Image (spheres, rainbow, N blue to C red):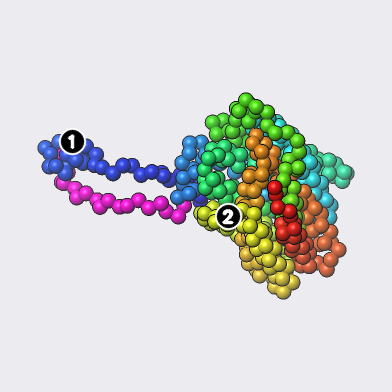
Amino acid sequence: MILFLAARPVVSPAPGPSPALGRARAGGPPGAAGTRPPLRPAPRRRARPGLLAPYRRIFAVPGTRAFTAANLTARLPMGMLSVSAVLMIAGVRGSYALAGAVTATGLAATALVGPWTARLVDRHGQARIAVPATALAVLGSLSLLLCVRHGAPDWTLFASYAATATTPNTGGMSRARWAHLFRDDPAARHTANSFEQAADELCFMLGPVLATLLCTTLFPEAGTAVAAALLLTGVLLFAAQRRTEPPVAARAAGRTPARGSLLRRSGLAPLLLTFLCTGAIFGSLEVVTVAYADDHGIRSAAGGLLALQAAGSGAAGLLYGLLRPAARAAHRFALCVGAMAALMLLPALAARAGGPAVLAVALLAAGMATAPAMVTGMGLVQSRTPEGRLNEGMTLAVTALLGGIAAGSATGGWAVEHLTGPGPAYLVPAAAAALALAATLLAPRPR
């Protein structure tokens, strides 16, 4: 919907009659333009900015719609791959613990390899690095598919999914383009970051639904196959949009970017710890929700339940982008994380006291604090990352998220099988949200 609205013209044509209409109003001689009766001029309306004017403004820049559409195609598989792997492995091997461990291994490998891939992107450009890195990741997904389909040993599943670690941070590359285009416009960057977070939530809303539909209606490996094809296609299209690609910092400025570990930057490491705990929310919530739906005989609705949580987050992210933040970013971040910790108690209460319908409402409400926290956190990451290493800094944030997702997936799978059913396992994401709040409140102030 936002792309449709953004495609509308931002600046209306200048008011004024055309020559033919002028001749008609002047009562000119009959001919090509003077045969119609005189027309009464329409009243002039004062242009109003409208609610979505900030989004129309950023998409008025040439090339932004093209790279956004391509990036959304590449980003949609991010919401499909882990759900597809869980459904595929659990459906064929019959173990959610194995499925959670395999996805956790792949995400942990991505957390280790991702920053190196991002550093190469910063040094050599997005187009030169993203395409070969994506090709290697797609080969890993296809290897996982074949190993599951042909009954290969369990260790091959871990090795294959770990090979997907070279997947580039497509969301980070898109945010880097916005940061380059609006490097002198903080308000536009806030709107763009809010849109990117809403786009993440859209992909994580549609991805599980599509993955569940493919895996349950066609065959268990269908979700992984389609996700791999979409990832490769989207990255190829995104890399082809060269005019909006940010230049290599060292080459553009004639100097070498700051070196050394970004983890030593003041205020960045505590922020990454909060992202780690936030990722544990997402990972555990995904596995526990799939198991909850399976336990209630509605396995095909698991993607829909996850989509509701992403829908609440995406809507909140779009609304957050329309606001002009007044408080300091660090203060806003603490408030958003606190709201996320409070709302994440709702799924645990709903799973214990109600049925799937009550849980669906609770997941929708729980997601509404996620996007504002992520938008503000990403803004803090950008402000605390040195020039020339922006993609690496944002990839570290995503790496922390992936590490948390890996830990959350494994913990959620263990809780499902060792506690008294999937309902009590919803305490895992609630505990992860509480840890995220503690990490935020106890973090030292950056110098």
Kindly give the residue lying farthest to the front in the view shown: 447
* Labelled disc at residue 317: 2
Which residue is painted at 55% across and 48% down in the image?
190
Rate crowding at label 2 as few (under 14), some (14 to 19) or many (20 or more) other CA atoms within 10 Å. Answer: many
Specify the segment rendered in magenta: 34-52
Kindly give the residue lying farthest to the bottom in the view shown: 353
Q: In which quarter of the image is residue 114?
A: top right
The amino acid marked with disc number 1 is Ala
Which residue is painted at 52% across and 43% down in the image?
185
Horizontal side of residue 84 vs 51, given as left or right: right
Foreground mark, 2 or 1, reads 2
Near-viewer residue (61 or 29):
61
- The CA span between labels 2 and 1 is 53 Å
Residue occupied by mark 1: 32
Rendered view: 207 above or below 131? below
Horizontal side of residue 414 vs 384, given as left or right: right
Which residue is painted at 76% across and 38% down in the image?
261
Res 310 visible: no
Near-viewer residue (174 or 142):
174
SS at badge 1: loop
SS at badge 2: helix
